[in-house]
């Protein structure tokens, strides 16, 4: 599956959020600007998400309203991914916004220092008991351009064989910007949540 990038400057006000990992990751884009925010919150997503979103809009000088919401669909803990999805769906109902989903793994495609990659990369999240939930993507300009190996749960050993020789990013904080750009480029309206 190959995707085409969408320019951020032409996009409507878009909020991206992910609660699938121990991090609460947010991004907000509007014509002419973008803000990102991420913090390790453990299991306190439900307590932190509303305040963090309001603060992000306030810092951007925008009214608390978006036309599109991008949700990281996991994999993640059962409670974690459902907190983000429930919050996004609630906002969408109030705002009349579209909600699109992208795998949380797409938020890991950027390197540890926010380096934009233009190559194939392997990404994974720990699925416990020697397993990972991993994928291999071709990345251009910091976002997924093609799915080479779709996200799936597999043994760490099998995934390391598949990822041999590729840059490999795992278990970090998802990038709000990468999630937002992926949502604009190829977010799915018929998304489903994935659990570790």
Image (cartoon, grey):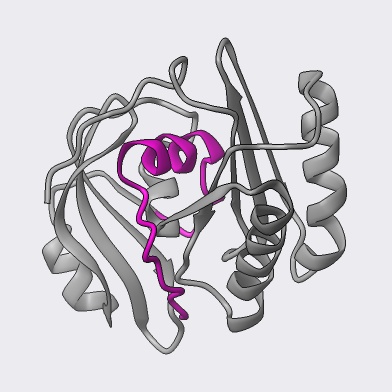
Q: In the image, 65: left or right of 113?
A: right
Which residue is painted at 37% across and 41% down in the image?
A: 182
Q: Position of residue 122 (x, y in %)?
A: 25, 53
Q: Any magenta on residue 16?
A: no
Q: Quadrant of residue 185?
A: top left
In the displayed structure, 84 sits above or below 29; it is below
Q: In the image, 33: left or right of 149?
A: right
Q: Which residue, as the protein is rendered here, is positioned at the far top?
A: 32
Which residue is painted at 57% across and 10% down in the image?
A: 32
Res. 125 in view: yes
Which residue is painted at 45% across and 58% down in the image?
A: 104
Residue in front for this viewpoint, 129 or 32 = 32
Residue in front for this viewpoint, 169 or 23 = 23
Which residue is painted at 13% across and 67% down in the image?
A: 161
Q: Position of residue 79 (x, y in %)?
A: 66, 80
In the displayed structure, 71 sits above or below 69; it is below
Q: Position of residue 132 (x, y in %)?
A: 35, 75
Q: Any magenta on residue 177?
A: yes
Res. 110 in view: no
Magenta residues (range): 170-196
């Amino acid at each position: 599956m190959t995707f085409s990038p969408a320019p951020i400057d032409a996009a409507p006000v878009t909020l991206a959020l992910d609660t699938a990992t121990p991090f609460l990751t947010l991004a907000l884009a509007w014509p002419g600007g973008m803000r990102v925010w991420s913090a390790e919150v453990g299991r306190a997503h439900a307590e932190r998400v509303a305040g963090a979103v309001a603060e992000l809009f306030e810092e951007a000088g925008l009214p608390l309203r978006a036309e599109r919401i991008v949700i990281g669909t996991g994999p993640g803990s059962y409670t974690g991914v459902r907190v983000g999805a429930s919050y996004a769906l609630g906002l969408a109902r109030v705002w009349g916004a579209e909600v699109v989903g992208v795998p949380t793994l797409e938020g890991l495609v950027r390197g540890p220092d926010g380096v934009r990659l233009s190559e194939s990369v392997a990404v994974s999240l720990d699925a416990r008991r020697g397993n990972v939930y991993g994928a291999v993507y071709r990345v251009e300009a910091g976002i997924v351009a093609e799915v080479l190996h779709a996200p799936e749960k597999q043994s760490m050993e099998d995934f390391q064989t598949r990822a041999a020789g590729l840059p490999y990013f795992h278990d970090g904080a998802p990038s709000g910007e990468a999630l937002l750009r992926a949502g604009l480029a190829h977010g799915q309206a018929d998304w489903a949540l994935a659990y570790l």
